[in-house]
């Protein structure tokens, strides 16, 4: 039935990108690609398998799953914004039991690596979802969505306070296999994202996923009311890329060794490279999938090319490369002349 | 569906004005060959470095085989926003990104029955393909098209050729019967002894048509237009409350479970809300 038109591995061949080793060690996972889908932009992978071979990218990060079935919010649920969009879905989903029986089973049968994003209205709900996934198996890692802005009470955004963020992570860790990596998905809508990152890691998170959407609002000037039924929504897309990049940079600088999945407006391999240089071990592609369903496979190939063009043989060598010290005047002169030479040959 | 959707670059062959609308002909290899009546495509807006990150969805108006070009699609554009205005300004040889065919097509009767097709505004666009398929099956096809005013009607002359009868309505009486499509529906249905009603147009019109059909025990299929971010089933923005076979109301995606729905299954009055009895609805409606 599915005859994918793009394969991440194949698309990277026949260029400078072909010789770049794209295998990515992320927490305890050994992935064939650093490119993942972003939660909420890929459902549970099945629809995207029409457009590229989902087994060739690093992993499918599923839409956040909760304990019970959930209808989500009323429509309108989205509005386009300059280089971005606002969404207010409200975590619509089938509930964890149906997810395990249908979606997770399909992903495993298909041979895709799955990172399950989980959400909850209370810390206890996160724990119950994690416990069910532990029994089900077939999960590479858990991403804990403590930062969805589309919950009824903005006070429930656990990621806005270090203590509540840590509490959720503790409960998820207690209810999960010791070996399974846990990523805390963080919100940029905080005063100090490094403080939150440190608190979730101290609470048992293996790594962090940065960033979730920023809370925003769009006005409908015909009705002269907010455009979304939920009034506010999460801003995503290239518009938020510099904010996301700054968050990755700050966290990497403070915590040199933790696994970081970077995301926020990645549309090309060039954009992905920015995140890798800033310190992300892997990247998630989200809103760009809506525009280009095969974006994850394309971005993998483009990123390999960008790395190859800069002389990297392994993606792991490029992770956090922008943090290297300026060792001497001679060093920086050599680097700038290399950059110029690369530029001329393009 | 005959095949799965694909992502292709299409070359624009023609852009023609028709009333308030533009008809764009574009090559669509791999899409036009398998497209069925009622399905749609999404078009990328604004080129590679665009600030418009979302594709726009358009019902497939016609599919044609144009010799050297292979399969082509015709799309009807109403230039009301930034994206559709940009698209209406494309010219011959410009290229656009296409994804399709998407969505479930209209269901066709296996018997040569009597059908009424109703189009509101550019909602008549997908009825051309549908009318052709129904005629091939020996069905009677009566058409009603309506709009607020004459230049918002689409395809009246061409539709006349593929139908047994055609009634035009406008709200302001500038063309055809003054009034709405539902004002003439009863007489058309009575004259044609209608078995099935197909409709495409604004939600208000679909709601009235579906109510009429349900009241008169006529099977109906409606093509809805919901704003959607992805069109392929992953974003969850285009949902509406639909009653399933099991009598349970769910918030379903109009892109993959629609855009064609049985008229008696959609909870028209509740569109834009999550009904309290919907599957997974909050126990208590939260005011935000």
Image: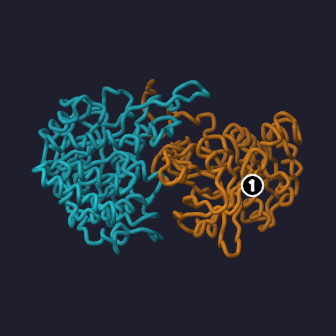
Chain colours: A cyan, B orange
Name above or below for residue A326 compared with residue B170.
below
Q: Quadrant of residue A14?
A: bottom left
Q: Which of B131 and A68 lies nearest the eye of the viewer? A: B131
Compared across the picture, whether A91 is left or right of B96 comes to left
Q: Which is more toward the observer, B124 or A211?
A: A211
Q: Quadrant of residue A189?
A: top left
Whole-percent x, y for residue B197 in the image: 75, 51
Q: Is residue A68 above or below residue B131?
A: above
Mark 1 lies on residue = B16
Give the chain of mark 1. B
Is B47 left or right of A72, judged from the image as shown? right
Query: Residue B253 at what x, y percent from top left?
Result: 52, 48
Quarter holding the N terminus of chain B is bottom right
Name which residue lies at 42% across and 68% down.
A6
- Badge 1 density bin: few <14, some 14–19, many ≥20, Cα 10 Å: few
Q: Nearer the viewer, residue B101 or A341?
A: A341
Work out whether residue B102 or residue A74 is closer to the camera in this orientation and state it: B102
Query: Is residue A135 among what the camera can see?
Result: no
């Amino acid at each position: 039935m599915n005859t994918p038109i793009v394969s991440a591995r194949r698309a990277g061949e026949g260029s400078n990108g072909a010789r770049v080793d794209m295998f990515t060690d992320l927490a305890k996972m050994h992935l064939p690609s650093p490119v993942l889908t972003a939660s909420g932009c890929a459902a549970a992978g099945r629809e995207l398998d029409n457009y590229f071979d989902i087994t060739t990218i690093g992993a499918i990060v599923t839409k956040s799953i909760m304990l019970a079935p959930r209808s989500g919010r009323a429509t309108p649920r989205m509005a386009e914004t300059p280089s971005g969009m606002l969404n207010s879905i409200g975590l619509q989903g089938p509930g964890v039991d149906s997810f395990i029986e249908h979606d997770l089973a399909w992903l495993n049968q298909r041979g895709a690596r799955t990172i399950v994003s989980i959400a909850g209205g209370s810390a206890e709900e996160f724990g119950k979802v994690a416990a069910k996934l532990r029994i089900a198996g077939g999960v590479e890692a858990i991403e804990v969505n403590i930062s969805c802005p589309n919950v009824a009470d903005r006070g429930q955004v656990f990621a806005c306070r270090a203590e509540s963020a840590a509490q959720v992570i503790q409960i998820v860790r207690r209810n999960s296999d010791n070996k399974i990596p846990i990523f805390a998905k963080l919100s940029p809508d905080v005063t100090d994202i490094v403080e939150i990152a440190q608190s979730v890691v101290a609470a048992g998170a293996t790594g962090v996923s940065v960033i979730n959407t920023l809370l925003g609002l769009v006005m409908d000037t015909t009705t002269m009311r907010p455009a979304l039924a939920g009034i506010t929504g999460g801003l995503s897309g290239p518009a938020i890329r510099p904010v996301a990049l700054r968050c990755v940079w700050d966290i990497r600088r403070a915590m040199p060794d933790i696994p970081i999945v970077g995301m926020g407006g990645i549309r090309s391999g060039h954009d992905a490279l920015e995140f890798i240089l800033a310190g992300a071990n892997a990247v998630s592609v989200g809103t760009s999938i809506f525009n280009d369903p095969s974006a994850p496979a394309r971005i993998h190939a483009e990123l390999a090319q960008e790395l190859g063009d800069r002389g990297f043989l392994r993606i792991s060598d490029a992770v956090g490369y922008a943090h290297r010290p300026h060792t001497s005047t001679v060093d920086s002169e050599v680097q700038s002349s290399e950059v110029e030479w690369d530029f001329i040959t393009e | 569906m005959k095949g799965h959707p694909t992502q292709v670059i299409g070359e624009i062959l023609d852009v023609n004005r028709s009333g308030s609308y533009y008809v764009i002909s574009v090559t669509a290899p791999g899409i036009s060959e398998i497209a069925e009546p009622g399905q749609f495509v999404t078009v990328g807006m604004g080129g590679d470095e665009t600030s418009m990150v979302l594709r726009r969805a358009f019902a497939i108006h016609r599919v044609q085989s144009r010799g050297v070009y292979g399969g082509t699609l015709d799309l009807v554009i109403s230039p009301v926003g930034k994206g559709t205005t940009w698209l209406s300004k494309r010219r011959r040889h410009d290229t656009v990104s296409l994804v399709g065919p998407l969505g479930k097509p209209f269901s066709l009767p296996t018997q040569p029955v009597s059908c009424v097709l109703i189009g509101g505004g550019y909602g008549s666009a997908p009825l051309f393909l549908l009318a052709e398929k129904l005629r091939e099956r020996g069905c009677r096809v009566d058409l009603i098209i309506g709009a607020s005013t004459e230049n918002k009607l689409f395809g009246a002359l061409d539709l006349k050729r593929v139908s047994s009868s055609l009634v035009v309505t406008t709200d302001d009486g500038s063309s055809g019967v003054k009034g709405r499509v539902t004002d003439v529906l009863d007489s058309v249905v009575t004259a044609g002894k209608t078995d099935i009603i197909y409709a495409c147009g604004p939600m208000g019109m679909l709601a009235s048509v579906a109510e009429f059909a349900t009241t008169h025990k006529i099977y109906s299929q409606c093509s809805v237009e919901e704003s959607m971010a992805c069109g392929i089933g992953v974003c969850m923005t285009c949902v509406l409350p639909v009653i399933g076979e099991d009598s349970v109301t769910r918030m379903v995606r109009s892109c993959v479970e629609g855009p064609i729905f049985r008229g008696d299954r959609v909870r028209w009055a509740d569109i834009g809300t999550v009904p309290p009895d919907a599957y997974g609805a909050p126990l208590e409606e939260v005011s935000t």
